[in-house]
Image (tube, rainbow, N blue to C red):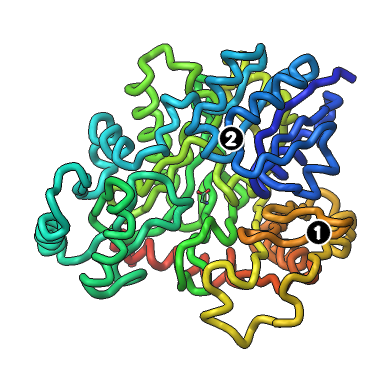
Amino acid sequence: MEKVGVLVVSYGARAAAMIDAFKRSANYDVRLYVADKQANPFNMEKAEKHVVIPDLNVEEICSFAKKHEAEIDFGIVGPEKPIIQGVRDKIEAETRIPMICPTREYAIEASKVAQRRLFEKFAPEVNPRFKIFDPKDYANTEEVRKELFEWLDELNNQVAVKPDVPAAGKGVGVWGDHFTTREQLFEHFMANFRHGAVIVEEKIEGEESSFQAFCDGKHLVPLPETRDYKRAFDGDKGPNTGGMGAYKDKGEKLPFMTHQDREKEIEIVNRIFRKWTGSTGNTALRGIPFYVAFIHTGKQPKILENNSRPGDPEIQAILPVLKEDFVDVCYRILDGNLTRIETEQQAAVVTYKVPPNYGGYMKAFPDRVSKAEIGTPVDLTEAYRLAEKYGTRLRVYPAAMEKRNGETYALKSRTVCTVGVGETIEEARRISIEGIRAIKGGALWYRTDIASKEHVAKSIRHMQVLRGSP
Ligand code: GLY
């Protein structure tokens, strides 16, 4: 079998899912060189060489790539920070390793202001009404407060406050969800404004879907739609998180979307891609340059934000159902002939288990946390045993975990996710939850309503109301 060496820049379960997809290759003997944020037990076990680079700085990632240059055929990047800091530009300039991720110039998630301006130019209808507050335009706090409050008058307080720079979904504050008075809003605004520009935009009511597309520079190949669960607690309550879980349905779209919604999304993203890169495209956008959070309003879909990387947990709902060899997909991206990607007609549900303090859980629900279990090792043995029983229908992907003295421990961020795959969303969810329940220790907890029948039905009803349908 042909040998192939792959550099994986990793943070979290998203990279574990990529590594799993590479290791399932039927056509290649894949050797993995993993530059990881932490001593992820799954990645360590699968890797030929594994290095921990806690801040994922580009210099060290590049040194690791250089050290193994002779064995590496290409690289792929999961997290945003090294992409924004130009990991592809540096590795491609200093080695002969081609990288799958956008270049620094095209990492538009680096700035929400730049994104809004890009959409304004190429697809203005996807922007909500917005205003940019840049610290360099104001002499003092009073001045910005006055202008902000005038803007709030205009939008009747119904706004979302977003820092320009990425904050893993956690810097965004929404009226009615995160604050209910102008003073609370102003506090949130200032906490971000002290560090840079802030966008205050019209709050959009609707249902969210995550659109992701692989790109070889010339072609944009949409992946099936997924739904992310951003809020920490059941019923979409609590603070925003990196994402507590996700689901995909059997087909391309989500149950609350119409085929026209899906086609509209594809048309919008293609239009932005074509106008941005010209008719010949641009290989600088290789990877997943568009992971777009759409919100469906019943009329014109709007874009909440774009990221230039795969979503976590969204990509974990897709990679396990790829019909094709992931190495071949990567080679087609690099060769510029990625015209389509086949996925199984299967639903998938991702559920995350997270540490007791994550999302403020322990403070909100002190009685639900077993104090004796805090800081104890996280035992995945039973979950892996179940995964063996389920074959490809259950996957267990460690995220912010580290191996220490032969045990695995939870760190501060999301700890581990399970992906259930089934004929229906309900079946996939049942398998995902069975996997989650089999994970012991660490006082971990999870949202119990990811992809639940009630949650999905609520989204469908909501869209019916928004569309004005009976
Ligand atoms: N699911 C949120 C993110 O990947 O940014």
Secondary structure found at label 1: strand
Residue picked out by circle 1: 408
Give the position of the C terminus as an image quadrant: bottom left
143 to 433, vertically: above or below: above
- Residue found at x 66% / y 58%: 424
Label 2 vs 1, first from the N-terminus: 2
Foreground residue among 338 and 312: 312
Type of the residue with mark 2:
Asn
Left or right: residue 146 versus residue 426 is: left
Residue 222 in the image: above or below residue 293: above
- Quadrant of the image occupied by residue 385: bottom right
Q: Is mark 1 within 8 Å of ligand 1?
A: no
Task: Using the rendered image of the protein, determine whether residue 421 is visible from the camera's viewpoint.
Answer: no
Nearest to the observer: residue 332 or residue 153: 153
Quadrant position of residue 192: bottom left
For label 2, the residue is 57
Q: Position of residue 231 (x, y in %)?
A: 48, 65
Look at the numbered disc 2 and say if its residue's Cβ is closer than 8 Å to ligand 1. no
Whether pointer 2 and pointer 1 mark residues with C-beta atoms closer than 8 Å, the reply is no
Give me the residue at 46% from left, 57% from top: 256
The quarter of the image holding the N terminus is top right
